[in-house]
């Protein structure tokens, strides 16, 4: 991703979608908000609350530590003051990782070596991990593949906490990972196949999703 071109991936979103994305970020994002009455507010989003009538109220902390309260209905304009911190959210996942990840290095060989080590951690019975070759061409994809297998390991760790889970998992010998628009997981004989959008932002709760789908299949 060229640093001068990432803005082209941003897509229009509703004010509610933008505010929710800002609120769900782990780090504080400075935003500016204009209201119907002409007021201009700038600061950090503290809370979004919905009342019994489905009306949403917003709480904002300013730089000089003033706290403002207003309704979503009164918002006319939202400005993200630090868009580089929200590349994934503003592009709705088209940009799959934060800009900071570009400082990381993970070659195809390094990824394959890492997977070879990870294979034994997924289970001593795992003989083979197969990747869709077309997904290895970009750094973002390779980093996502690494994250997918890390999430899979967490899911398997939860699954195999008891004897029943261990018995179910020990039959899997091959893991296939493929590119797809929607997340799918299937098991045929001794092969686990996972398909998802490797080139997009991964679900935040991927480990839980994989665990749930494994429980449905095993």
Image (tube, rainbow, N blue to C red):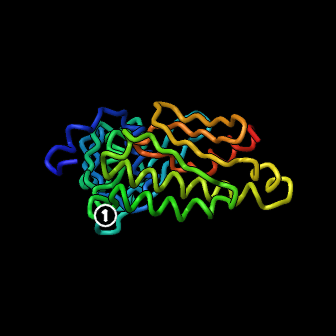
Identify the image quadrant of the C terminus: top right
Looking at the image, which residue sits at the far bottom? 64
Q: Is residue 165 left or right of residue 144?
A: right
Residue at 38% across / 52% down in the picture?
142
Residue at 29% across / 36% down in the picture?
76
Q: Nearer the viewer, residue 139 or 204?
A: 139
**Label 1 element class:** loop
User: Can residue 135 be seen from the camera position used here?
Assistant: yes
Q: Nearer the viewer, residue 47 or 127?
A: 127
Note whether 137 is above or below 162 in the view shown: above
Residue at 48% across / 55% down in the picture?
147
Residue 139 x/y as whole percent: 31, 52
Q: Nearer the viewer, residue 2 or 65?
A: 2
User: Can residue 43 be seen from the camera position used here?
Assistant: no
Q: Residues within 10 Å of mark 1 (few under 14, many from 20)?
A: few
Looking at the image, which residue sits at the far left? 4
Q: Is residue 130 left or right of residue 70?
A: right
Q: How many marks?
A: 1
Looking at the image, which residue sits at the far front? 127
Residue 51 x/y as whole percent: 58, 41
Residue at 25% across / 49% down in the picture?
40
Residue 208 x/y as whole percent: 64, 50
Residue 60 x/y as whole percent: 39, 56
Q: Which quadrant of the figure has residue 77?
A: top left
Instruction: Identify the residue under disc 1.
Output: 104
């Amino acid at each position: 991703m060229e640093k001068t071109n990432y803005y082209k991936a941003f897509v229009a979103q509703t004010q509610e979608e933008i505010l929710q994305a800002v609120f769900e970020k782990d780090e504080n994002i400075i935003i500016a908000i204009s209201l119907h009455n002409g007021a201009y507010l700038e600061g950090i989003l503290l809370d979004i609350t919905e009342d019994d009538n489905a009306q949403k109220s917003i709480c904002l902390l300013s730089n000089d530590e003033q706290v403002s309260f207003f309704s979503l209905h009164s918002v006319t304009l939202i400005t993200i003051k630090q868009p580089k911190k929200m590349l994934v959210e503003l592009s709705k996942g088209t940009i799959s990782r934060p800009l900071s990840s570009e400082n990381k290095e993970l070659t195809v060989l390094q990824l394959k070596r890492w997977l070879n080590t990870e294979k034994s951690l997924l289970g001593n019975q795992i003989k083979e991990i197969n990747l869709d070759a077309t997904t290895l061409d970009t750094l973002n994809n390779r980093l996502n593949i690494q994250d997918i297998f890390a999430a899979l390991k967490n899911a398997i760790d939860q699954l195999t906490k008891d004897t029943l889970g261990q018995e179910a998992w020990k039959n899997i010998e091959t893991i296939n990972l493929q590119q797809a628009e929607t997340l799918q997981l299937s098991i045929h004989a001794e092969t686990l196949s996972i398909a998802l959008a490797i080139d997009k932002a991964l679900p935040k709760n991927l480990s839980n999703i994989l665990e749930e789908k494994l429980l449905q299949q095993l």
